[in-house]
Image: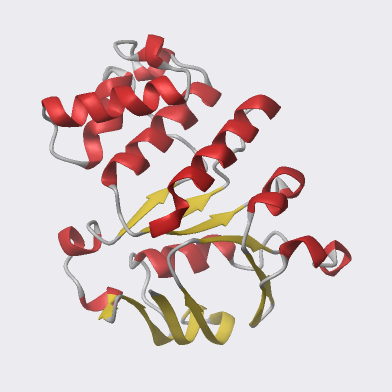
Amino acid sequence: MLRLNQLSTGFKTKCLQKGISLNFEPGTIALLLGRNGVGKSVFLRTLMGIQKPLQGEVTINDQNLHSLKPERRANLISLMLSTPPQVELLTALEVACSSIKHNKEAENNAKFWFQNLEILNLTHKAFGQCSDGEKQKIMLTRCLLQNTPVILMDEPTAFLDYPAKIQFWNTMKSISANKIIVVSTHDIDTAIPNATHLIHLKNQDATLSIDPLSFNLNLL
């Protein structure tokens, strides 16, 4: 379970969200929506454990995320950022395996996801020579190989064409049964039909909907 207990996020000089208490069980695909500047990235970084909350706590399976060492956090939660890293010389396979111990099993698992994401031909291609959309699929594979119970994603479909976006959401649904997935996105049309929950961030507030299809988008 992912639990937010009276969580306040932001900076010493500015509180962005205040007193958020939410619980998520495995099987959750939660969309994180809100206007630019409301603090979605800060919220994700706080959930990831790389930015301290102003108040409150984030727990995964009753473990306080911010009290854990980085290597232990990496076993519980993974993050896919909106912009791929600037890596020129590593191959797609090496980048995909960089979140875990790189061995033959890791390579076989990476190739499994490469096959599913239709990028097996990129296996030995230099990451820096791949297109932005291809890089996103490689970084998605990297995130999946980490195999954590909680996955956070910041604009993961930003560089994908429409068929690839549908493929992305099909992949999320295929792995979601025993995971909690939180996705920050502006790509609402393809995201909402695939979500189980919707988190709407507002200034110093957040609301949760368990019926994303009925959410009034005019509130954004």
Q: Is residue 41 above or below residue 117?
A: below
Residue drawn at 36 percent across, 43 percent down: 143
Q: How is the image coloured?
A: secondary structure
**Direction from residue 85 to residue 170 in the image, left or right:** right
Q: Quadrant of residue 163?
A: top right
Residue drawn at 32 percent across, 14 percent down: 123
**Image quadrant in which the N terminus is located:** bottom left
**Image quadrant in which the C terminus is located:** bottom right
Instruction: Using the image as rendered, state which of residue 8 and residue 149 is in the foreground.
Output: 149
Q: Is residue 115 above or below residue 168?
A: above
Give residue 8's position: percent from left, percent from top: 50, 84
Give residue 165's position: percent from left, percent from top: 63, 34
Q: Quadrant of residue 127?
A: top left
Residue drawn at 77 percent across, 46 percent down: 189
**Direction from residue 217 to residue 183 in the image, left or right:** left
Give residue 210's position: percent from left, percent from top: 66, 72
